[in-house]
Amino acid sequence: MRKFILFALAFCCFVSAGVAQQGTEAERAAYRKVITGRADKIAVKLGIQDTVKKNVVRDIIADQYIALNDIHSSRDEKIKALKADKSLDKDVRASKVSLIEAEAGPKLARLHNEYMIKLGKQLSKEQIEKVKDGMTYSVLPITYKGYLEMLPDLKENQKEQILAYLTEAREYAMNAGSSEKKHAWFGKFKGKINNYLSAEGVETKKAREDWEKKLKERQQTN
């Protein structure tokens, strides 16, 4: 329940992001303060002893959140305007919307690459992993651990493939504009994982039922 509440709060912050970008100076300053606080919670978990350096990392993370919001809100405003234009044919409108969505892709990819370079100048690979997990609610380690518990007989190559899919999902999720969309990316790659395991002859349905039963029993015990 606590995780659900945190996810909901994060989602609300992202939804309000577009308003912050287009609002008054006071509103933008307030948004910057909220985002800086979120970034600081990630930065403090990196074990950086130098306060100045920790704050530099915090600001890099905060700037990334804000830059992501700029791209997403600009895209969403254009799509909103198109959908409000009743003079457009349905197919024409859909085509224009797809084009706007496609245009955002390279911008997000470029921003992501620049972000990784900035973090790479300040942090170790292990610390960058923590930043990535911090921006995606630690879905990767939680989900990977779940697969290992649910399917204890997985082969090493199967474990590696599951981790590779989840790692790819996390890269996309980092660029998403809301909690819901971040989780949607992981959901998409969980589908790929299930298809992969099925092709490998791994029975997941019964294993999942047994695992969920154990989780419920564990929760009741606690």
Image (cartoon, rainbow, N blue to C red):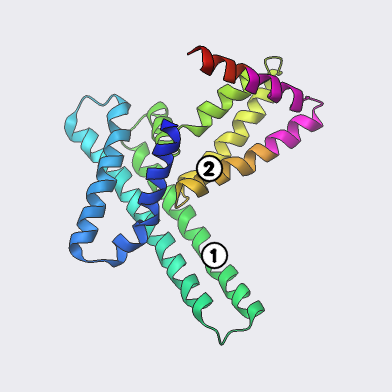
Q: Is residue 213 left or right of residue 30?
A: right
**SS for tag 2?**
helix
Percent coordinates x, y for residue 24 in the rendering: 21, 66
Tell me what residue is drawn at x 30 percent, y 50 percent. Answer: 63
Q: Amino acid at mark 1?
A: Glu
Q: Residue sitting at 72 percent across and 21 percent down?
A: 207
Q: Quadrant of residue 143?
A: top right
Residue 97 versus residue 45 in the image, above or below: below
Q: Which residue lies most toward the front here? A: 220
Between the residue at mark 1 and the residue at mark 2, the CA separation in whole angstroms equals: 19 Å
Secondary structure beneath dot 1 equals helix
Q: Residue at x 55, y 35 (%)?
A: 167
- Residue 208 lies within the magenta run: yes
The residue that mark 1 highlights is 101
Q: Magenta residues, as a range?
A: 192-213
- Label 1 crowd bin: few (<14), some (14–19), many (20+), radius 10 Å: some
